[in-house]
Image: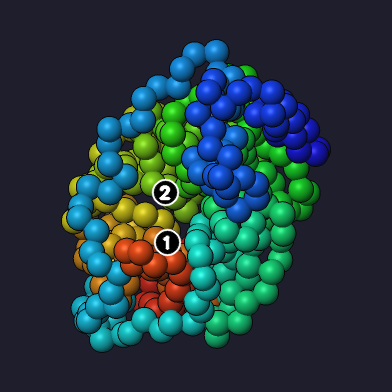
Amino acid sequence: MTRSRSIALLSVVGSLVTAVAMAQLPVNRAQPAGSGVQAASDVRDAVIRGLCNLPPPPPSTRRRFTFRPRPPGPYPYSVKAIPGVVAAGVEWKLIWVHNGNNADGMVGQPDGSVLAAQNDDSEVVRITPDGHSSTVYVDTDTGGSLAENKLGELFIAERAVVPSVWELAPERKLIADSYQDKPLECQGTGAMDSAVALHNGGVYFAWAGFYYASPDGRVTKVFDQDVNDAVLSPDETKMYMGSGGNLYVADVGPDGSLTHTHVLARIPGGGNDGGAVDAEGRIYMAGYPGVRVFAPDGTYLGTIPAPRNLIDVAFSGPDKKTLFAIAYVLSPGASGFDEVYTLPMIAQGYLGRAK
């Protein structure tokens, strides 16, 4: 399958931008457009929203983070023991640095490396535990979140104008780029994120809510709140979702539906970003304080502090006992950059799935 729907829609948008007077559409031609530019920053996004049959709902009043962000750091820290999880005194090791928003949505790989999406470069990069990197996929159209299921099928959530979910491997094809026959932009504002892949080929993703795209591309809304990353339990019967300072849990149905959704725990310090699970089903949520760790029943086990504000975590490395973490460092008035750190763990990541 090609990018037929996305290309057709962009062709219409291009014609409208050319034909409609500036006074009629709030389009600033100095704004960026194209690969590597997130939808909300793309000059064409306002035009696509104008194609919606109904005005999009107002932006959510819920804040993505419910705590005050710390300055960029780095910070002094001291790791305390969490039984079965991490030993006292271990230290994070900086292994990789890249300018821009160019590491997100990590998934572990059998060789001990991780794959990370490069938002600004529209590529996917492989990063080894010793910090070597190589490009493995290109032209992802602002890919920002990866997911890989138990069968090894790899998916990416693309954040460009006309946000979409694509399969990257074993076949490169479009999975979904609309909801109820309208572009996702019609549902509200946000950034394509939080890709999670079921063993059946279905994919979850966040965009002004949380959605499920079935293997045949049918999209349903499964959670009506902003989600900033989600992760499946090892047996894929539970979905854990970070939203508004809460850790939610839901039962996963055979059709991808989520039921009995409820708050499992409050996230200490509020807010969260990327998550992971280990072989024992413990849940890890990255954020500004570090990595918060919860038991499967929601019991808070402790925080692994970090030298930077973290946006994602994933297990990989030898025997999957290394925790990889991404820090996006952004200082006022300066260009941002990404750092990838590793930390030796007692806990082992779940071996039956990439994340």
Whether residue 302 is situated above or below residue 12 in the rendered picture: below
Q: Residue at x 55, y 82 (%)?
A: 131
Quarter of the image where one finds residue 243:
top left
Whether residue 181 is situated above or below residue 198 in the rendered picture: above
| Residue 345 seen from this side | yes
Is residue 313 rendered to the left or right of residue 48?
A: left
Distance from disc 1 to disc 2, alpha carbons, whole Å, reads: 9 Å
Kindly identify which residue carries mark 1.
Answer: 312
Q: As shown in the figure, which amino acid type bears the numbered disc 1? A: Asp
Q: Nearer the viewer, residue 336 or 297?
A: 336
> Disc 2 on helix, strand or loop?
loop
Check the picture and name the quadrant holding the N terminus.
Answer: top right
Task: Pick whichever of labels 1 and 2 is earlier in the sequence.
Answer: 2
Kindly identify which residue carries mark 2.
Answer: 229
Looking at the picture, how far across and down is residue 266, in whole percent?
20, 48
Q: Nearer the viewer, residue 144 or 92?
A: 144
Q: Which mark is residue 13?
A: none
Q: Are marks 1 and 2 in contact (CB under 8 Å)?
A: yes
